[in-house]
């Protein structure tokens, strides 16, 4: 199942370069009734979060029993407020924690659908990717994602959704919209444009940059010539480019000038037996992950190359988690949020994976070891000075959903060996830094946007408390997390 999952892993993300300017983060002046129905704390001149624990997103220790003062949608101060402005909205939050809004660096607005999938795992062509504009945006914001990036199958839908959210017409996170997948001629997705050559890659990037997208993603079957043309054109427009690659290896992509690589170190194919230039092997990186053990010379050389070329890496552990049969993590909230056909398809594939693991314990142990090695390589990358970001690749595959998957990614980073504070930094400030938005989001500091998540409990000690979202502030407006999540229940896979 790993080969199928990797083939279905969703797009890579791109960030704006300072030369062109930062991704716009716009605050609406008015909110429509469709938005206000989910508002718990309306915008006010002064809002005070009293007696709250603060995880500021920088990796620093949590601050206990303090106050966060918000003034006109911006963070005014962190510290015990000696005076509170008359008429201020005051929230008593003893026993709660506030941390920066999550910056989802591998998020999507669609799921993967296999027509007439049955319990034996067979389905009919074509593989489809339905857009889920309603449930995805509600889940992201409800689970604390205040900024998301993506790869797009319906870029016009995503562009229009971004504009509607920024105007206050519909609820959702701020969006960095990726152009359509930059994919080669052998794509399994019927909805993707298949690049003809390098000139087509250049022209595609140029066209979509002019339509207003703010990022690009290269996909599995793109060739080196096509990727180079896309990178150069994206950079000409002041944008970066990321990739979920296969035909092109990580070292090749780094030398070509790519800015970001997706899925950690799970899809690098440089050591796959029989790897041919510009061809995606059917092993899709598994042999490389087995051979390139953390701490080894090959891993060190590859990581040093990425760090020296300033190539960031996005961790997407939730979509890889089912590779390890010991990692059985099926949440009731995820199953309840899926539409019935989506839930049925997920359970079919999950049951098949568990049965195959039981039938072949040696292979299951090998896959579990590969998953742990992928985690260790991400730790090694960070230790070497690399910029690691977080995103779950939420397409329903592997039970990974928008928002919930972003939270699970943070939990898995802790399982990978990062401290809770380090994991939260990876999922907040690191993404904001790569997006060119660290001066406005990604950490809690005076002058920054009030993009904040309030949860019950203490994620600095128990990372699963990150799931206890109660209020999500975006631009100083506090949204009712549970109302947003409840609105998507039974709808993911439908709309």
Image: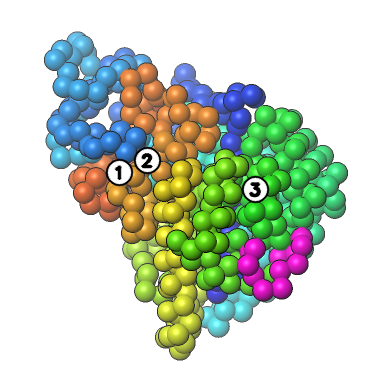
Q: Residues within 10 Å of mark 2 (few under 14, many from 20)?
A: many
Q: Is residue 327 above or below residue 31?
A: below
Q: Nearer the viewer, residue 140 or 339?
A: 140
Q: Which residues are magenta?
A: 269-280
Q: How many marks?
A: 3
How far apart are the two marked residues, 3 and 2, measured between alpha carbons? 25 Å
Q: Is residue 366 left or right of residue 446?
A: right
User: Could you say which quadrant of the image residue 288 lies in?
Assistant: bottom right
SS for callout 1 = helix
Where disc 3 sits, the SS reads: helix
Give the alpha-carbon distance from disc 1 to disc 2, as whole Å: 6 Å
Q: Nearer the viewer, mark 3 or mark 1?
A: 3
Q: Secondary structure at mark 2?
A: helix
From the image, state whether disc 3 or disc 2 is nearer to you: 3
Q: Which residue is mark 1?
A: 421
Asked whether the residues under the numbered discs 1 and 2 touch, taking CB atoms below 8 Å apart as contact, a structural biologist would say yes
Mark nearer the N terminus (3 vs 2):
3
The one of 94 and 388 positioned closer to us in this rendering: 388
Question: Which label number is shown at residue 254?
Answer: 3
Image quadrant holding the N terminus, namely: bottom right
446, 172: nearer the viewer: 446
Front-most of residues 107 and 184: 184
Crowding at dot 3, Cα within 10 Å, few <14 / some 14-19 / many 20+, comes out as many
Residue 282: % across, % down: 67, 72
C-alpha distance separating marks 3 and 1: 29 Å
In this figure, which residue is indicated by the disc labeled 2? 425
Q: Residue at x 50, y 40 (%)?
A: 148
- Mark 1 is surrounded, within 10 Å at the Cα level, by few (under 14), some (14 to 19) or many (20 or more) other residues, namely many
């Amino acid at each position: 199942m790993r080969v199928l999952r990797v083939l279905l892993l969703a797009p890579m993300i791109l960030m704006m370069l300072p030369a062109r300017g930062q991704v716009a983060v716009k605050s609406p002046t008015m909110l429509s009734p469709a938005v206000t129905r989910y508002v718990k704390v309306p915008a006010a001149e002064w809002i005070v979060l009293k007696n709250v624990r603060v995880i500021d997103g920088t990796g620093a220790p949590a601050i206990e029993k303090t106050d966060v003062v918000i003034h006109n949608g911006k963070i005014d101060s962190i510290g015990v407020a000696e005076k509170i402005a008359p008429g201020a909205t005051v929230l008593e939050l003893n026993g709660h924690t506030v941390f920066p809004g999550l910056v989802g660096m591998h998020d999507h607005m669609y799921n993967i659908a296999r027509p007439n999938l049955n319990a034996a795992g067979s389905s009919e062509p074509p593989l489809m990717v339905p857009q889920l504009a309603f449930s995805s945006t509600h889940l992201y914001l409800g689970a604390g994602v205040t900024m998301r990036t993506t790869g797009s199958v319906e870029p016009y839908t995503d562009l229009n959704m971004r504009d509607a959210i920024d105007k206050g017409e519909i609820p959702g996170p701020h969006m960095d919209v990726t152009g359509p997948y930059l994919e080669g001629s052998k794509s399994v997705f019927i909805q993707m444009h298949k690049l003809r050559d390098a000139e087509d890659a250049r022209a595609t990037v140029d066209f979509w940059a002019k339509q207003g997208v703010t990022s690009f993603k290269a996909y599995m079957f793109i060739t080196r010539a096509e990727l180079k043309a896309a990178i150069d054109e994206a950079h000409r427009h002041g944008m970066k480019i990321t990739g979920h690659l296969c035909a092109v290896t990580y070292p090749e992509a780094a030398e070509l000038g790519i800015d970001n690589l997706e899925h950690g170190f799970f899809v690098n194919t440089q050591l796959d037996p029989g790897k041919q230039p510009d061809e995606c092997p059917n092993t899709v990186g598994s042999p490389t992950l087995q051979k390139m053990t953390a701490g080894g010379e090959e891993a060190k050389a590859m990581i040093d190359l990425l760090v020296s070329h300033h190539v960031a890496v996005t961790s997407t552990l939730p979509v890889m988690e089912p590779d390890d049969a010991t990692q059985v993590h099926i949440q009731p909230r995820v199953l309840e949020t899926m539409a019935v056909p989506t839930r049925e398809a997920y359970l079919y594939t999950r049951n098949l994976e568990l049965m195959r693991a039981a039938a072949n314990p040696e292979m299951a142990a090998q896959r579990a070891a590969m998953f742990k090695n992928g985690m260790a390589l991400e730790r090694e990358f960070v230790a070497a000075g690399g910029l690691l970001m977080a995103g779950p690749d939420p397409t329903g595959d592997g039970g990974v959903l928008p928002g919930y998957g972003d939270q699970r990614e943070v939990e898995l980073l802790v399982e990978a060996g990062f401290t809770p504070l380090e994991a939260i930094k990876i999922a907040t400030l690191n993404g904001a830094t790569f997006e060119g938005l660290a001066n406005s989001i990604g950490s809690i500091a005076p002058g920054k946007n009030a993009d904040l998540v309030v949860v019950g409990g203490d994620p600095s000690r128990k990372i699963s408390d990150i799931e206890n979202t109660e209020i999500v502030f975006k631009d100083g407006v506090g949204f009712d997390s549970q109302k947003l999540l409840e609105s998507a229940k039974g709808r993911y896979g439908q709309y």
